[in-house]
Image (spheres, rainbow, N blue to C red):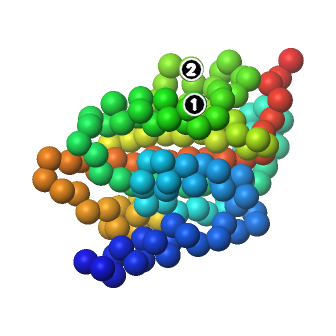
């Protein structure tokens, strides 16, 4: 039992790679406030605003809760706002969806909460393996994609 806890601490305290800097605040929030196991990886994204490929990063996180996943998502978004994250200025950033885009400093991060493993990635497998689900609790996942903050299109 101690080995998974030590591994989780090592993963959660590992330094973020320089090309993953836009995930630093989001990963700290998920690990600290949400008490999730989270893994950060560099990535690139097709930005629909600029029509360019931009560098960024992704966070794969998991946790267990006694709340429904819907209620856990509501709580996550409320806590993000309380921690100083703001919605991006773009009105098309999923206003009524399970995924919401928030901004902190120079980073825009799209947060998505789901009930089950859907990505099929190695990172998803690793974080899910580290989460021990007690009786009466359910595992849930948060997937985050972060990139440099962009202005809203005119």
Residue at (57% x, 30% y) in the render: 81
Residue at (14% x, 47% y) in the render: 136
Please indicate, yes or no, whether residue 118 appears anywhere in the rendered image. Answer: no
- Classify the position of the N terminus by image quarter: bottom left
Q: Give the crowd class for mark 2: few <14, some 14-19, many >=20 residues within 10 Å.
A: few
User: Mark 2 or mark 1, which has the lower sequence index?
Assistant: 1
**Which residue occupies the foreground of this view, 144 or 136?**
136
**Label 2 – label 1 distance at C-alpha:** 14 Å
Residue 23, quarter of picture? bottom right
In percent of width and height, residue 147 lies at 72, 47
- Classify the position of the C terminus by image quarter: top right
Q: Is residue 113 above or below residue 20?
A: above
Q: Is residue 152 above or below residue 45?
A: above
Residue underneath mark 1: 81
In the picture provided, is 124 more to the left or to the right than 67?
right
Residue 4, quarter of picture? bottom left
Q: Do the residues labelled 2 and 1 touch (CB within 8 Å)?
A: no
Residue at (79% x, 43% y) in the render: 106
Residue at (55% x, 70% y) in the render: 13
Checking the image for residue 95, the label placed there is: 2
Q: Give the crowd class for mark 1: few <14, some 14-19, many >=20 residues within 10 Å.
A: some
In the picture provided, is 124 more to the left or to the right than 146?
left
- Callout 2: SS: loop
Please indicate, yes or no, whether residue 131 appears anywhere in the rendered image. Answer: yes
In percent of width and height, residue 29 lies at 55, 49
- Callout 1: SS: helix
In the current view of this chain or complex, which residue is farthest to the right?
154
In percent of width and height, residue 27 lies at 57, 54
**Which residue occupies the foreground of this view, 80 or 41?**
80
């Amino acid at each position: 039992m101690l080995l998974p806890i030590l591994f989780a601490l090592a993963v959660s305290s590992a330094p973020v790679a320089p090309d993953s800097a836009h995930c630093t605040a989001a990963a700290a929030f998920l690990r600290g406030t949400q008490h999730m196991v989270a893994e950060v990886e560099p990535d690139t994204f097709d930005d629909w605003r600029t029509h360019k490929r931009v560098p960024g990063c992704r966070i794969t996180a998991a946790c267990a809760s006694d709340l429904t996943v819907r209620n856990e998502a509501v709580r996550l978004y409320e806590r993000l706002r309380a921690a100083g994250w703001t919605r991006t200025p773009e009105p098309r950033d999923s206003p009524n969806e399970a995924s919401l885009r928030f901004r902190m400093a120079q980073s825009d991060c799209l947060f998505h909460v789901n009930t089950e493993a859907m990505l099929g990635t190695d990172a998803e497998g690793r974080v899910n393996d580290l989460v021990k689900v007690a009786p009466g609790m359910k595992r849930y996942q948060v997937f985050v994609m972060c990139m440099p903050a962009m202005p809203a299109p005119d």
